[in-house]
Amino acid sequence: MKRLFAVLLSCIFLLALSLPVFAQSRAKALVEAQCSKCHGIKKVTTASKTPAEWSVTLDRMIKKGAKIEAADKDAVLQYLNTLNK
């Protein structure tokens, strides 16, 4: 019984560690898919913007048709803010 509990606890711990990686990889995929529809992805990955500037840019791109769901917006912004650091 202790062994089962230890295995279960380990699985939960590993899952918790992998969630941020999954969120970032999903955000990266969204950025690559949505941003590259209108311009090259290099324009995004080489842009040097502050978090506030990325927020304004993302809102503008969503208004222009980028399909970023509200639930994904924070993760996308977090990913964008990791670029060029």
Image: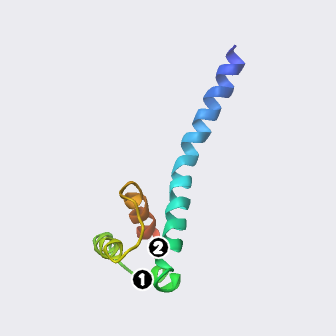
Residue in the image at 43% along x and 70% along y: 80
Vertical placement of residue 42 versus 65, above or below: below
Q: Quadrant of the N terminus?
A: top right
Looking at the picture, does residue 7 appear above or below residue 55?
Answer: above
The residue sitting at the front extreme is 65
Q: Amino acid at mark 2?
A: Leu
The spot of residue 76 in percent (x, y) is 43, 64
| Image-quadrant location for residue 78 | bottom left
**On screen, residue 74 above or below 31:** above
Name the secondary structure under disc 1.
Answer: loop
Q: Nearer the viewer, residue 48 or 60?
A: 60
- When the figure is inspected, residue 79 is found, relative to residue 1, above or below; the finding is below
Disc 2 + disc 1, Cβ < 8 Å? yes
Colouring method of the image: rainbow
Q: Residue at x 35, y 57 (%)?
A: 70
What residue sits right under mark 2 in the picture?
A: 83
The x, y position of residue 83, in whole percent, is 46, 73
Q: Is residue 34 left or right of residue 63?
A: right
How many other residues sit within 10 Å of disc 2, few (<14), some (14-19) or many (≥20)? Answer: few
Quadrant placement of the C terminus: bottom left
| Residue displayed at 41% across by 72% down | 66
Left or right of 83? Residue 15 is right
Q: Tell me the tag on residue 1.
A: none
Quarter of the figure with residue 48: bottom left
Q: Which residue is mark 1?
A: 47
Q: Position of residue 33 (x, y in %)?
A: 53, 72
Q: Earlier in the sequence, mark 2 or mark 1?
A: 1
Farthest top residue in view? 1
Image spot of residue 5 (x, y percent) = 65, 20
